[in-house]
Image: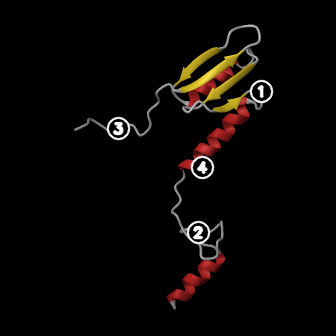
Amino acid sequence: MTGGLEPTEAYDGSITVRLLDDTARAEEHGCGSYEEAIAVVKANQHDVTVAKIEDRDENVVFTSADMDIEDWERIWRQEKRRQSVHVEAYDCTYDSVSCFADDLCVQCEIDRVQDQY
């Protein structure tokens, strides 16, 4: 038996920050989380030509040539927060995108009231 809860997410250092400079060699930093990668970019963004963050599948998810790290961080945090919100699946009869099990659209509310009588 384990002594506590097992972690639900493991960081293996597979998020990579690449710091590219026109005059020097490129540097790679293995990071254990996006927070760590963001901190590396922020610490080095003014000393390099381009800073990039690659995900675990080696896809470039951020490049300083296209966007400011603070803007990307804000969007990343919003998306992370959005994905962590659990909403019970509900199939609206009227295909309303704003209809949820705990917050029905007007038509579904009317149907529910009519079904009670």
**What residue is pinned by disc 4?**
82
Q: Nearer the viewer, residue 19 or 38?
A: 19
Q: Nearer the viewer, residue 24 or 113?
A: 24
Separation of residues labelled 1 and 3 (CA atoms):
39 Å
Mark 2: secondary structure: loop
Separation of residues labelled 3 and 2 (CA atoms):
34 Å
Q: Position of residue 34 (x, y in %)?
A: 58, 31
**What residue is pinned by disc 1?**
65
Q: Nearer the viewer, residue 44 or 64?
A: 64
Q: Residue furthest bottom?
A: 117
**What residue is pinned by disc 3?**
6
Q: Answer with the quarter of the image where residue 24 lies.
A: top right
- Badge 2 crowding class, 10 Å Cα cut-off, few under 14, some 14 to 19, many 20 or more, is few
Q: What residue do we see at 50% from left, 25% from top?
A: 13
Q: Amino acid at mark 3?
A: Glu
Q: Which of the two labelled residues, at mark 2 and mark 4, occupies the earlier sequence position?
A: 4
Q: Which mark is residue 103?
A: 2
- Badge 1 crowding class, 10 Å Cα cut-off, few under 14, some 14 to 19, many 20 or more, is few
Q: Position of residue 77 (x, y in %)?
A: 62, 40
Q: Which of the two labelled residues, at mark 1 and mark 3, occupies the earlier sequence position?
A: 3
Q: Amino acid at mark 1?
A: Ala
Are discs 3 and 2 less than 8 Å apart at CB?
A: no
Q: Nearer the viewer, mark 2 or mark 4?
A: 4
Q: Amino acid at mark 2?
A: Asp
Separation of residues labelled 2 and 4 (CA atoms):
17 Å
- Badge 3 crowding class, 10 Å Cα cut-off, few under 14, some 14 to 19, many 20 or more, is few
Separation of residues labelled 4 and 1 (CA atoms):
26 Å
Please state the total of marks drawn on the protein image.
Answer: 4
